[in-house]
Image (cartoon, rainbow, N blue to C red):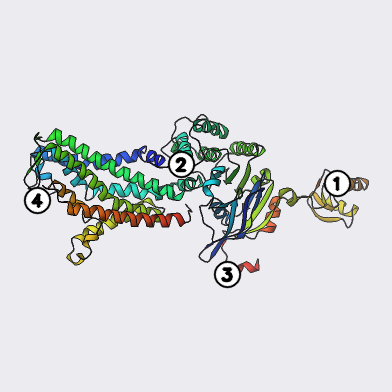
Amino acid sequence: MIAVELRKLFRRPRTWVTIGLLNGLPVLVAVLLALTDLAPRPGEGPVFLSAVLTNGTLYPLAALAIVLPLFLPIAVSVVAGEAVAGEAQAGTLRYLLARPAGRTRLLVAKLVAVIAFVLVAVVVVAAVGYLTGQLLFDVQPIGGTALSGTTLTSQEIAGRTLLAIGYVTVSMLGVAAFALFFSTLTDSPLGATLGALAVLIASSLLFTLDAASSFAPYLPTRYWLAFVDLFRDPILWRDVVRGVALQGVYVVVLVGAAWANFTTKDVTS
Amino acid sequence: MSGVIETSGLVKRYGQLRAVDGIDLDVRAGDVYGFLGANGSGKTTTVRMLLGLVLPTQGEVRLLGEPMPKAARRVLPRVGALIEGPAHYGHLSGRANLALLDAAGPGGARRTRTARIDTVLEQVGLAGVRRRPVKDYSLGMRQRLGLAGALLRRPELLVLDEPTNGLDPQGIHEIRDLLLDLHRGGTTVFLSSHLLAEVEQLCTRVGVLDRGRLVLQDQLSTLTAPTGATIVETPDPGRVRAALDGRVLSTSAGRAVVRGDDPAEVNAALVGAGVPVTGLALERPSLEEVVLAAASTSADRVDAPGERSRR
């Protein structure tokens, strides 16, 4: 069943178009920076962007930081919102369940496929970022500067970039879980996607609000940018660990809710 | 156990509405069962409950002798279904769609998959479609592909909801032949339809659903058994009345209905009296008459409160 879902997802042209579009903005930003040599000053604009002119090795991270706030969650919401509601809308859900695929199995397979999509999307963004970084900017063979001012070796940067890829993937799982849960509630994939995005926008907004500070640590977007801490020397694990734990809680609760709803609902689509 | 589909006291309530109101289906092995009912009478909800898509409010469903939806994983691989029109992934070919569906559940061995897909595509008349994506198929082709999906694991029971929808007359004829062929091979067919003619031509047993209740369930041959009257075709019905006084039940233009279940005897009497007779037949109720007598108004008709009682 998992193999079937993965095949369905990755044989679908739309999946690759989404991933392609996701890379549009980072590439555009890279081209603009390379042409104008006008990087934002440190502390301004997306993280890592100020450093890429002097060291292209950091561009995968800059690319991730560019897509993280909006583009990546949109892509994830689209795919996860589609998961069950898309099948319902197309009418294929009734045939899958009468096959019988098994409701729990189907939901697990959908979840795995969505996670695979997030991972592939993040890796592709990082890979395209790496290529554009290598092509458009100066690359320092000796490694780069950590945000704390000390120097990291290329190996350290590579290792921490991999960690960052993992962390960004995990950060997206909360969104994915929201979209998947909504996807079991409605027969409209668009509704599920927009629902998940509404949660994100609300979370980002509340995060900036002092009045909401009492529950700010529990907002799903709270620790998204903590992957920056992986490039401090030594690594500042606190927020990274909290971020992973928080996403874990969201995933468990929402997937549990999705399961409870999906396994007991009448499929009338 | 010969019961292929058995339900007892099956109820599905949506809020106040009892979409299915305590039905006891009894479909036996070897039946071609026609499940008739107007639009909105609860046919689709019943079919979905049989397959475990909709969960009953009350009552039980047993499919191939096992409880549903509890035994779905054991039972459903032995059942082929076409539920409310076909549905496929439009960007994939018919073949890829069938392969994905087959791989999505138990009971479809991968080793035999290609061969089985070839066989069913041949059976439904789609052997030559090659790699065309399903979104370019006509409605009739999609219907055939849906049927192919239902046949993929040579099911013991076929549950078909309006299987000839969207097909042209030749297509309908082909599918009817295919279903009869499968039936001869031992497949039980449960055919849900609102097309009386289709059911009359295909089915051996009939169930009629009206507003969520099963108002009729019997052998087709019993339902349409001769009434004991003979229909006489004649250019002059008035003379029939004169010749067989007291036995004539009704007359209309070119036709008289006479009590008596022996057309030869009726004929002899009429010819003896010099009445010209152009045709003779035993009177049988049509399925349509049987269904109309059993069922009330069309279920999608919504009368004002109190209106119905005056009908």
Asked whether disc 1 touches disc 4, contact meaning CB atoms under 8 Å apart, the reply is no
Q: What residue would you read off at disc 4?
A: A43
Counting from the top left corner in percent of width and height, residue A164 is at 20, 45
Dot 1 falls on which chain?
B
Per the model, the C-alpha gap separating discs 4 and 2 is: 50 Å
Asked if badge 1 and badge 4 are on a common chain, one would say no
Q: What residue would you read off at disc 3?
A: B305
Task: Tell me if mark 4 has few (under 14), some (14-19) or many (20+) residues whose alpha carbon lies within 10 angstroms of its own.
Answer: few
Q: What residue type is labelled 4?
A: Gly
Q: What residue would you read off at disc 2?
A: B104
Q: What element carries label 3?
A: loop
Q: What element carries label 2?
A: loop
**Is residue B187 depicted above or below B290 in this figure?**
above
Per the model, the C-alpha gap separating discs 1 and 2 is: 59 Å
Residue B177 appearing in the image = yes
Residue B263: mark in rendering? 1
Q: Which amino acid does label 3 sit on?
A: Pro
Per the model, the C-alpha gap separating discs 4 and 3 is: 72 Å
Horizontal arrangement in the rendering, residue B105 relative to residue A147 (left or right): right
**Camera-nearest residue between B253 and B48:** B48
Per the model, the C-alpha gap separating discs 3 and 1 is: 48 Å
**Camera-nearest residue between B98 and B269:** B98
Per the model, the C-alpha gap separating discs 2 and 3 is: 48 Å
